[in-house]
Image (cartoon, rainbow, N blue to C red):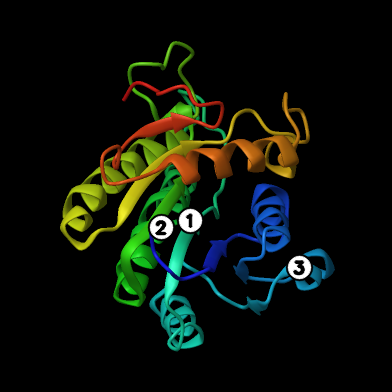
Amino acid sequence: MSDSNVVVITGANRGIGLELARLYAARGYEVIGVCRQSSEELAAVAAQVIEGVDVTTEAGIEKLRYGLSDKRIGLLINNAGLLQDEQLGSIDFDSIRTQMEINAYAPLRVAEALVPLMEYGSKIANITSRMGSIADNDSGGRYGYRASKAALNAFGKSLATDLKPEGIAVAQLHPGYVQTRMVNFGGLISPQEAAQGLAERIAELNLDNTGSFWHSNGEELPW
């Protein structure tokens, strides 16, 4: 386990990211919230907020790298995400590209940029979705979201393999169907419940189970 108590969370200004920030701050961690625009709620719990960061751009990644240059990161949570809907017959490919940039490419950009600030025992948690599971898809639709989360899962699995020799473990974590703005607050569990489950899975993450795809309730999900 890394000796660093620094937790970096992207998309930390609201929803699941904010609840994760609250949870880790309450447990005594040094929480660094990363977002495009901060919130009063995040400012109240984070030790540091790095705002104005667009994680889909090189400028945003460089700003993040510079803001964290004096830190040793114990846990990186790639949480920022976007959900849009496309239906066959009226697919918006620009929407799919945008979701790929935010949901898949951005977490890989962030991980690649911040790995040099991590150490043996550090962890990376990619907040993905069971909608990225190909085996579990029995309802179709959501082309961009499904594809982007499947890509994130593939990236995370490769990261887990590449970083294992460096002692860094990586997990792909589905938070559940959570009552957030992303789903018009129509979920089944609260952001607080999701954050608690995600934190439990992160605590269980190690080099033996690195690369796994878990539901926040502990269920291992199919690829």
Closer-to-camera residue (28/101): 28
The location of residue 48, given as percent across then percent down, is: 65, 79
Q: Amino acid at mark 2?
A: Pro
User: Seen in the image, is 212 located left or right of residue 196?
Assistant: left
Question: Percent from the top left, x then y, of residue 206?
Answer: 34, 45
- Disc 3 or 1, which lies upstream in sequence? 3
Instruction: Give the residue type that dot 1 points to.
Output: Asn
Nearer to the camera, 100 or 149: 149
| Residue position for label 3 | 45
Quarter of the rendering occupied by the C terminus: top left
Q: Element type at marker 2?
A: helix
Q: Secondary structure at mark 1?
A: strand
Residue occupied by mark 1: 78
Who is closer to the viewer here, 80 or 82?
80
Q: Earlier in the sequence, mark 1 or mark 2?
A: 1
Residue assigned mark 2: 107
Number of numbered markers: 3
State left or right for residue 209 relative to residue 58: left
User: The residue under label 3 is which amino acid type?
Assistant: Val
Q: Position of residue 197 (x, y in %)?
A: 60, 36
Q: Residue at x 54, y 53 (%)?
A: 79
The residue under the point 44% across, 71% down is 73
Determine whether label 1 and label 2 are within 8 Å by CB. yes
> CB of mark 3 within 8 Å of CB of mark 1?
no
Q: CA distance from mark 3 to mark 1?
A: 18 Å
Mark 2 crowd level (few <14, some 14–19, many ≥20, 10 Å Cα):
many
Between label 3 and label 2, give the one nearer the viewer. Answer: 3
Q: CA distance from mark 3 to mark 2?
A: 23 Å
How many angstroms separate mark 1 from mark 2 (CA)?
Answer: 6 Å
The answer to whether residue 133 is visible is: yes
> Does 169 sit left or right of 69 as displayed?
left
